[in-house]
């Protein structure tokens, strides 16, 4: 596979994943703001948190206008200047898909293009007139449909595995960001319930729980559960598996920098438990995971998408210039 | 009920559909019956759905002239254009003959230049052309094939005679619309196909791939073919992607390639991979920054050396533009006689060369009756249609021609034939042309997959996609169809 195409697959799925999560985070915040968060400092704090997750900033650094919901939707959905807004993510995903027209199945391309045309036809005003929630869920559903038709139609070759890499790296780092917005491991119920909903985890968590649930259990579930497809551990293991499928080297061997970083990430999650999390502290732990994910992304860049000069140095001295 | 009886707005226009006021031509009898039973509303809403589907599927082109660079679809007209088997055979043979002669001309003009030495074509016309590629002088191209893929534009004049309007032997586009048009028409209006037996078009990618593989260097056993595109901003990017995809070959950009020791490679996730044949959809000037435009990042440095060494096949060859320079167009019949010792099967359109002083005077004095074209222009840009022009435009062209006569030719206004076309919910006569494609590998193949473009504006003679044109599905009746 062309390195350029591999990189486009990677960014395509990263951006679809991000659009889906941003849509879900906003939808959860919006619907909760209608009852338990309605009015007062709760509402403001919840929008601050949502914007922080969606724009990769710290909640304390988020500036809010007087109309928090309107402001948040404008910034996180339609602001083309914000690279993590839904329109930006979908625009970037489609840009990569155009570069992959020769590689993608028709179904995947059409789903992406339809989502793009749909989002582009809306505006902050038009979704406020309808129901913001209906719009946000449509975005979320269509993103999931893209992942679904990808799984159903793409060859299990490099392109697919680069998509897996992008998807699970993005999912893992967004999950870490959601976790970082918790105050502590002893947050009250609405807070950890919010994190579960933002991670599509309330039902899976309830299924998995064996005793009365707590913030600590919910956090441990989102970090360590090996079967929940959005937990940090699950994401890390998928990333490592995809890297081995791409390089062809057997699991348990670590041939290049990307595989080494992925191995390190998996070790931090597979060989730890809730007690380790308590001992290290939630925020230091999440920060460490995010730093490892960043080094892993940098390693993938340098192993698979190297930036090389257009003219190979040897050619400058060949007879090519004589003509 | 659809009213099919509307006739062309001016006299002296060949009607493709009707033989006289009420009788359809034999090819169209069955279609006329089917159309008579179709509700106009169904046709209109079907077309709206098709155009929306084309946008959704991203079957679009980019218009450079608009600053926004918007993506637009090439509007689709549902009324198919139909050729009898025999009619198509005549056209295909004529196209084949023309392409063989143009290829022979290129081979000659970059080697012995016999046709110039024998005075059949003025040598200054060739050597003054900026489409003449000096880099190709004396370069032996693989298998002596220059024009692997060409599109020959034909029109039908007032008498119904097919004439060549221009040859496109650089990187002609449009085949993707042929394939899409057939596909959408089948899905949307299957009833139109009732009672017809027509040639399929969807084997075009396979035929193209066969031609491209035949362009490989002799040593390559399973040749590695790629499509080379300038990238996603090119107006025909959709077509590049579609062809690469349907041939199952990589769609590469210049930055995906590297030349090492005069061999061309792709940069892949598994290292460098050898390339044997490049089907390039970028212009000569951008192929190799070391030889051509140094500021270009679309091509690959060192490509020209690999090409000259015979290590990579290139479709089309560099320098084919000289064969479709509009100033040389009027000599194509002469090329056919000179190289093939045959009489041309397809006629040209009468053409005046502005570099000749007497012709130039005549052209400038009669601008309102002529069509003036830039010799290196395309896409319907840089041309003047006399009868539709303003005095200011004519004055501007007179000045342009005087300043640079070599760059202009003039032709009488040809009344393109007309064909019923859906316009504002009714069928109205609109002007059409035809672009058959020819593939030149071991032999010349003219697949029954031609593009019919239609001028959607009433009375307009310009069919270009960038200027209000649309397209129609084009049917060639199979040999066993009883109308053939």
Image (cartoon, coloured by chain):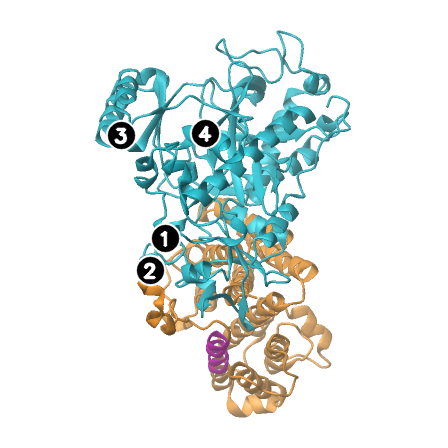
**Farthest front residue in view:** B118
Residue B378: x, y in percent? 40, 36
Chain orange in the figure, letter: A
| Residue at 51% in and 42% down | B60
Q: Residue at x 67, y 44 (%)?
A: B203
Seen in the image, is A234 located left or right of residue B294? right
Query: Pointer 4 indicates a residue of which chain?
Result: B
Query: For residue B364, which numbered disc appears in the image?
Result: none
Which chain has been coloured cyan in this picture?
A: B
Cα distance between the residues tagged 1 and 3: 26 Å
The residue wearing badge 2 is: A323
As drawn, B53 above or below A295: above
The local crowd at label 4, few if under 14, some if 14 to 19, many if 20 or more residues have their Cα within 10 Å, is some
State if disc 4 and disc 1 touch (CB < 8 Å): no
Q: Chain of mark 1?
A: B
Observer-side mark, 1 or 3, equals 1
Residue B234's spot in the image, x, y percent? Answer: 44, 48
Using the numbered discs, state the Cα–Cα distance from disc 3 to disc 4 in whole angstroms.
22 Å
Nearest to the eye among marks 1 and 4: give it.
4
Residue marked by disc 3: B405
Q: Secondary structure at mark 3?
A: helix
A244 to the left or right of B140: right
Residue at disc 2, secondary structure: loop
Residue A115 seen from this side: no
**Disc 4 designates what residue?**
B334
Mark positioned earlier in the residue sequence (3 or 4): 4
Q: Quadrant of residue B298?
A: bottom left
Q: Which mark identifies residue B135? A: 1
Mark 3 and mark 2: span between their CA atoms? 31 Å
* Alpha carbons under labels 2 and 1: distance apart: 8 Å
């Amino acid at each position: 596979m062309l390195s350029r195409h591999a990189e486009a697959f990677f960014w395509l799925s990263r951006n679809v994943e991000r659009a889906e999560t941003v849509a879900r985070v906003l939808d959860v915040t919006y619907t909760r703001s209608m009852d338990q968060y309605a009015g007062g400092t709760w509402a403001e704090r919840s929008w601050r948190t949502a914007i922080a997750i969606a724009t990769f900033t710290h909640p304390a650094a988020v500036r809010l206008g007087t109309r928090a919901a309107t402001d948040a939707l404008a910034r996180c959905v339609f602001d083309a200047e914000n690279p993590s807004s839904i329109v930006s993510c979908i625009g970037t995903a489609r840009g990569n898909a155009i570069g992959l027209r020769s590689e993608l199945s028709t179904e995947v391309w059409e789903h992406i293009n339809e989502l793009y045309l749909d989002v582009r036809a809306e505006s902050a005003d038009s979704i406020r007139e309808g129901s913001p929630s209906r719009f946000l869920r449509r975005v979320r559903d269509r993103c999931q449909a893209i992942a679904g038709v990808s799984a159903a139609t793409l060859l299990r070759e490099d392109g697919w595995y680069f998509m897996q890499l992008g998807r699970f790296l993005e999912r893992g780092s967004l999950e870490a960001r959601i976790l970082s917005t918790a105050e502590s491991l002893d947050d009250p119920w609405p807070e950890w319930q919010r994190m579960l909903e933002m991670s599509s985890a309330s039902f899976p968590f309830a299924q998995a729980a064996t005793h009365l649930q707590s913030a600590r259990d919910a956090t441990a579930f989102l970090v360590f559960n090996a079967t929940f497809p959005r937990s940090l551990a699950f994401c890390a293991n998928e990333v490592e598996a995809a890297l081995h499928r791409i390089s062809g080297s057997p699991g348990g061997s670590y041939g290049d920098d990307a595989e080494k970083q992925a191995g390190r990430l998996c070790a931090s999650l597979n060989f730890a438990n809730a007690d380790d999390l308590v001992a290290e502290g939630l925020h230091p732990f999440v920060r460490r995971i995010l730093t490892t994910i960043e080094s892993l992304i940098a390693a993938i860049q340098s192993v698979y998408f190297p930036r090389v000069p257009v003219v190979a140095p040897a050619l400058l001295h060949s007879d090519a210039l004589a003509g | 009920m659809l009213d099919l009886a509307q006739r062309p707005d001016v006299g002296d226009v060949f009607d493709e559909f009707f033989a006289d006021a009420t009788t359809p031509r034999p090819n169209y009898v069955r279609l006329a019956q089917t159309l008579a039973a179709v509700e106009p509303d169904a046709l209109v809403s079907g077309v709206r759905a098709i155009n929306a589907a084309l946008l959704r599927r991203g079957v679009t082109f980019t218009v450079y002239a608009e600053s926004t660079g918007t993506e637009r679809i090439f509007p689709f007209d549902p009324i198919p254009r139909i050729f009898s088997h025999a009619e198509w055979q005549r056209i295909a043979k004529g196209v084949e003959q023309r392409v063989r002669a143009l290829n022979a001309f290129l081979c000659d003009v970059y080697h012995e230049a016999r046709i110039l030495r024998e005075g059949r074509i003025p040598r200054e016309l060739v050597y003054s052309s900026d489409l003449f590629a000096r880099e190709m002088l004396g370069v032996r191209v693989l298998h002596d094939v220059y024009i692997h893929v060409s599109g020959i534009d034909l029109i039908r004049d007032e008498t119904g005679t097919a004439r060549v309007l221009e040859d496109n032997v650089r990187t002609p586009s449009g085949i993707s619309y042929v394939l899409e048009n057939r596909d959408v028409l089948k899905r949307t209006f299957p009833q139109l196909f009732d009672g017809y037996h027509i040639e399929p078009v969807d084997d075009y990618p396979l035929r193209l791939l066969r031609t491209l593989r035949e362009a490989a260097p002799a040593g390559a056993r399973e040749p590695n073919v790629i499509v080379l595109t300038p990238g996603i901003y090119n107006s025909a990017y959709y077509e590049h992607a579609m062809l690469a995809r349907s041939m199952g070959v990589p769609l590469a950009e210049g930055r995906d390639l590297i030349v090492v020791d005069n061999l061309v490679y792709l940069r892949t996730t598994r290292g460098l991979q050898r390339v044997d044949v490049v089907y390039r959809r970028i212009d000569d000037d951008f192929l190799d920054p070391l030889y051509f435009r140094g500021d270009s990042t679309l091509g690959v440095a060192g490509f020209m050396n690999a090409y000259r060494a015979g290590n990579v096949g290139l479709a089309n060859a560099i320098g084919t533009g000289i064969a479709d320079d509009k100033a040389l167009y009027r000599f194509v019949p002469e090329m056919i006689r000179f190289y093939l010792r045959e009489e041309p099967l397809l006629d040209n359109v009468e053409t005046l060369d502005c570099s000749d002083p007497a012709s130039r005077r005549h052209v400038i004095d009669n601008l309102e009756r002529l069509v003036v074209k830039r010799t290196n222009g395309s896409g319907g840009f840089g041309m003047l249609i006399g009868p539709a022009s303003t005095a200011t435009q004519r004055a501007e062209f007179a000045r342009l021609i005087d300043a640079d006569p070599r760059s202009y030719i003039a032709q009488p206004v040809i009344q393109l034939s007309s064909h019923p076309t859906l316009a504002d919910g009714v069928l109205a006569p609109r002007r059409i042309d035809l672009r058959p494609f020819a593939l030149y590998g071991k032999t010349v193949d003219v697949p029954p997959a031609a593009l019919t473009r239609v001028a959607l504006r009433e009375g307009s003679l310009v069919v270009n996609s960038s200027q209000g044109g649309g397209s129609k599905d084009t049917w060639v009746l199979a040999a066993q169809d009883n109308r053939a």
